Amino acid sequence: MGPDPGGPLRVALACEDQAQRALLMHLSRNVVLKEAHRRQADWLADTLDQQMAFCGLKDHAETPEHLRFYHHDHIAKDFGELRIGGRPVRLNALREGRPAGPEAQRWRRLTILFGAQPSPPDVLMIALDTDGHPERREALQAARSEASTAPIAVILATPHPEAEAWFVAGFEPLDGEEAARLDALRKDRDKKLNFIPTEEPHRLTAHPNDAPTDAKRVLRFLMFGDYTSRAPELSELPDLCERLLGDLDRLTRRSAATYLGEFLRELREILVPLLLPGPPPSSS
C-alpha cells in the first residue's frame, strides 16, 4: 500500500520559476490520482499528502510550500561547496570521448548534488523551458542517462517553448466573454495569431516578449483579459492549476509537440509505480 510507511515518498523539484514548480506539483498529483482511480485505489486521494511530499535541496519544517523547490541558479555555488569524503567533486570533462558542453556539465552537477545528500530524495524532477530551442533537451537527457544517482529516479519536464504553453493547452472557454477572447486572438488585427493557441500551443513563443505569440501574453489574455507579457503571480497559480491542469486527456491531445505528453508518460511510468506498486489493470 504505497511507499514505505516510515515516511512519504520524497519528490525533489528543480525548477527555473514558480510556474514550473506549480506545474510539476499539480500535474504529478493529478496523474497519480487518475491512475489510482483507474486501479480502484481511491483511498489514495485522502492520504496523498501523507504519501508524497515535494521538496527542494535542504528544506526544513518551516519552509513554506512555494519555496519547496530547488532553483537552477544555485547549482554552480552548491556544487562548488559539495564535498564527498572530505574532497571536492571533479567532473570528467569528456562525454563519449568528446568534451562535454556547459549545459551537459550543469545538469550532471545537479544530479550529483542531489544524489550526494545524506538523505537523497526518492525522485528528482528537473524542469527546463526550451525557450524555443528544443535542442536544450538533449543535454538534460544526456545527463540523466549518465547520472549515477541511484536509487533516485529522474523525471524530466521540458515545456516547449515555455511553461505557460502547458497552461494554455488546458484552456477551454467557460462563458461568452472567454470565448470572445479566444476568438479575438484569431481575428483582431493587433493580436492575430493565424492559429488557435489552445490547439497548437507549441507554436507560441518565449521571445520576444512583445510578440503576439508570446506564451505569457496569450495565457494572461485568455484568463484575465490583460494583454501584457508577464509570468503568473504566485497568488494566481493555485487557481490556474485547478482550472487548466485537471483534464489530462485534453492536455495530452493538445500538447504532444510541447513535450507535455512525454512528461505525463514519465509520471505514469516512473512516479506512479512508486506509490502504487504492482501491475496496472488491463486496458482491455
Image: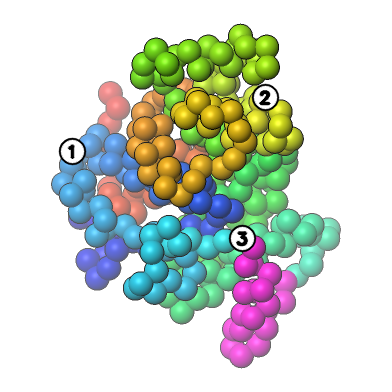
Mark 3 or 2: the one toward you: 2
Mark 1 / mark 2, whichever is N-terminal? 1
Mark 3 / mark 2, whichever is N-terminal? 3
Q: CA distance from mark 1 to mark 2?
A: 45 Å
Q: Which portion, as a residue range, is magenta?
A: 73-91
Q: CA distance from mark 3 to mark 1?
A: 38 Å
Mark 3 burial class by Cα count in 10 Å: few <14, some 14-19, many 20+: some
Q: Residue at x 58, y 71 (%)?
A: 113
Mark 3 or 1: the one toward you: 3
The residue that mark 1 highlights is 40
Q: Where is residue 258 drawn, in percent x and y?
A: 58, 32
Q: Where is residue 77 drawn, in percent x and y?
A: 66, 74
**Could you tell me which quadrant the C terminus lies in?**
top left
Q: Identity of the amino acid at label 1? A: Gln
Q: Is residue 225 left or right of residue 131?
A: left
Under tag 2, what secondary structure?
loop
Q: Is residue 229 magenta?
A: no
Q: Identity of the amino acid at label 3? A: His
Mark 3 / mark 1, whichever is N-terminal? 1
The residue that mark 2 highlights is 212
Q: Identity of the amino acid at label 2? A: Pro
Q: CA distance from mark 3 to mark 2?
A: 28 Å
The residue that mark 3 highlights is 72
